[in-house]
Image (spheres, rainbow, N blue to C red):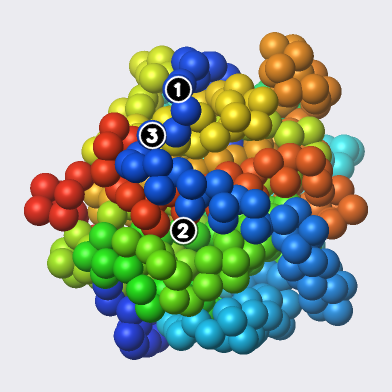
């Protein structure tokens, strides 16, 4: 899952189009009780339960073991643009082809960013910081000049009126505009570097300028508490950033059943890449393994009413690039042929949550955020997932559509979306710990985006439940997209082709 950084417009260029297939901030609001899954006939429910029984946690873990082994052989990473990712693609492709699927691996290009080292000293103190993705490298020495903390912190040139920032390192708060705008404005005023202080209490320091940006000066981030200390005690800054951005190519993996209606395609996907800092076995080997095992157990020619398309995305951690590139490659007719998209990203968090994407918008809206448009049909998907978890003895809570995973491009194109999520860096509440049996006050995944995201730290009990949810939901909609928890029929679907 991508970090809670602002994922603004992703500019990608397709190196080749699809050949044959044309067709977390978590909210703690509790979802209301639901009845048993209802998305069609008893036949559909029976088929879903049968597929659920075939997808065993032991087989899912075998895929995770293979992905862990790949990471072990490739500097503990499977990040897009690395040999570890390419070998992960090859593993998934071979498994699908051996089962009899026709498989496509459409290629796309993107900018691959790597921060090799960072050293930040303010006065006599070393300061913990993170390099924003796509920041240029360089060595900078200069005064620390805090920008005013106001409604548009560092977003306009006027925010620096009365401040001498030429040659200085400016400190600005996060918020109100993309990070790239803060860098551009500071550079225009003559600053030598930018330090962005978080505006919420978090332990991590991360973010991206966006691969379509053209930054001129180094940009790093610090936590809210560190930012407050720097603002109160500005001093001389020495900043060393060793970072590079290069153009690389990566692949998605697409496979579709040979049976079922191609005008009512049920699509299920998971991102295959990890972050550079770790092997990504929970994030998102678990989603990959569950979707892959569901595909293998369903088979290439099942007796289903609706075709099922499986997708394994590249470069999600770089900004949802692979899935966005794929959706952009489809015209309106092809988008209408996709009845719904199911997204599975992180299913075995150590301190597991049981979260479903808030398709029915039952959560209280945040008055400080622009409302997200949720496509018609997403509510039914959520009800199906919530009811499945209830059958497993887990009361689901909502997680917001915050643009952090690969459902985003599908939602923006008007395709109903949904999925299950076991939580990332957010901390479990006391109420959630009582309901789910976890540790209150601890992150759902303390290894999120770190070297410790290994097979040894995957919660197998949560994985069993959630991988079963993948199989159940895919099986249900493969047989029926009708009923209260279904989606609009083909002629009633509204789709929007994504540009750029």
The numbered disc on residue 35 is 1
The numbered disc on residue 268 is 2
Cα–Cα gap, marks 2 and 1:
24 Å
At numbered mark 3, what does the secondary structure look like: helix, strand or loop? loop
Picture coordinates of residue 193, whole percent (x, y): 60, 51
- What is the tally of numbered marks visible in this picture? 3
Residue 458 or residue 453, whichever sits in front: 458
Residue 223 or residue 63, whichever sits in front: 63
Q: Residue at x 49, y 60 (%)?
A: 269
Q: Is residue 387 above or below residue 416?
A: above
Cα–Cα gap, marks 3 and 1:
8 Å
Q: Residue at x 38, y 34 (%)?
A: 38
Which label lies toward us, 2 or 1?
1
Q: Residue at x 67, y 69 (%)?
A: 79
Whether residue 114 can be seen here: no
Q: Are marks 3 and 1 in contact (CB under 8 Å)?
A: yes
Q: Quadrant of the C terminus?
A: bottom left
At numbered mark 2, what does the secondary structure look like: helix, strand or loop? strand
Q: Residue at x 66, y 57 (%)?
A: 55
């Amino acid at each position: 899952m991508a970090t809670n950084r602002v994922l603004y417009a992703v500019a990608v260029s397709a190196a080749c189009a699809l050949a044959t297939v044309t067709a977390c901030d978590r909210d703690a609001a509790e979802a209301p009780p639901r009845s048993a899954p209802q998305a069609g006939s008893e036949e559909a429910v029976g088929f879903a339960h049968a597929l659920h029984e075939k997808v065993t946690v032991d087989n899912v873990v075998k895929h995770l073991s293979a992905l862990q082994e790949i990471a072990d052989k490739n500097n503990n990473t499977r990040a897009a643009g690395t040999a570890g990712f390419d070998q992960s693609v090859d593993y998934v492709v071979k498994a699908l082809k051996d089962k009899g699927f026709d498989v496509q691996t459409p290629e796309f290009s993107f900018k691959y960013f790597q921060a090799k080292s960072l050293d930040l000293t303010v006065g006599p103190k070393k300061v913990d910081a993170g390099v924003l993705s796509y920041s240029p490298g360089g060595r900078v020495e200069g005064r620390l000049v805090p920008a005013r903390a106001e409604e548009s912190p560092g977003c306009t040139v006027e925010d620096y009126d009365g401040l001498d920032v030429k040659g200085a390192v400016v400190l600005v708060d996060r918020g109100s505009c993309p990070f790239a705008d803060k860098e551009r404005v500071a550079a225009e005023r003559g600053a030598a570097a930018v330090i962005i202080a978080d505006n919420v209490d978090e332990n991590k320091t991360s973010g991206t300028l966006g691969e379509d940006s053209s930054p001129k000066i180094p940009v790093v981030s610090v936590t809210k508490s560190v930012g407050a200390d720097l603002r109160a005690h500005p001093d001389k800054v020495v900043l060393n950033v060793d970072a590079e951005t290069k153009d690389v190519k990566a692949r998605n993996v697409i496979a579709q059943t040979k049976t079922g209606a191609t005008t009512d395609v049920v699509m299920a996907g998971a991102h295959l890449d990890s972050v550079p800092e770790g092997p990504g076995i929970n994030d998102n080997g678990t989603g990959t393994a569950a979707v892959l095992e569901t595909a293998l157990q369903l088979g290439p020619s099942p007796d289903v009413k609706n075709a099922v398309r499986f997708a394994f995305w590249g470069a999600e951690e770089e900004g949802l690039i692979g899935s966005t590139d794929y959706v952009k490659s489809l015209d309106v007719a092809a988008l209408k042929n996709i009845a719904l998209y199911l997204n599975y990203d992180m299913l075995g968090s150590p301190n597991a949550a049981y979260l479903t994407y808030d398709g029915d918008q039952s959560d209280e809206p945040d008055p400080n955020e622009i409302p997200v448009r949720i496509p018609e049909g997403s509510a039914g998907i959520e009800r199906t997932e919530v009811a499945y978890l209830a059958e497993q003895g887990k009361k689901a809570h909502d997680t917001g559509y915050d643009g952090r995973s690969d459902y985003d491009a599908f939602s923006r194109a008007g395709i109903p979306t949904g999925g299950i999520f076991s939580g990332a860096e957010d901390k479990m509440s006391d109420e959630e710990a009582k309901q789910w049996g976890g540790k209150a006050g601890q992150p759902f995944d303390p290894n999120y985006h770190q070297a410790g995201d290994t097979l040894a730290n995957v919660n197998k009990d949560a994985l069993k439940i959630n991988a079963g949810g993948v199989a159940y939901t895919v099986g249900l909609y493969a047989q029926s997209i009708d009923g209260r928890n279904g989606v609009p029929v083909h002629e009633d679907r509204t789709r929007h082709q994504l540009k750029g």
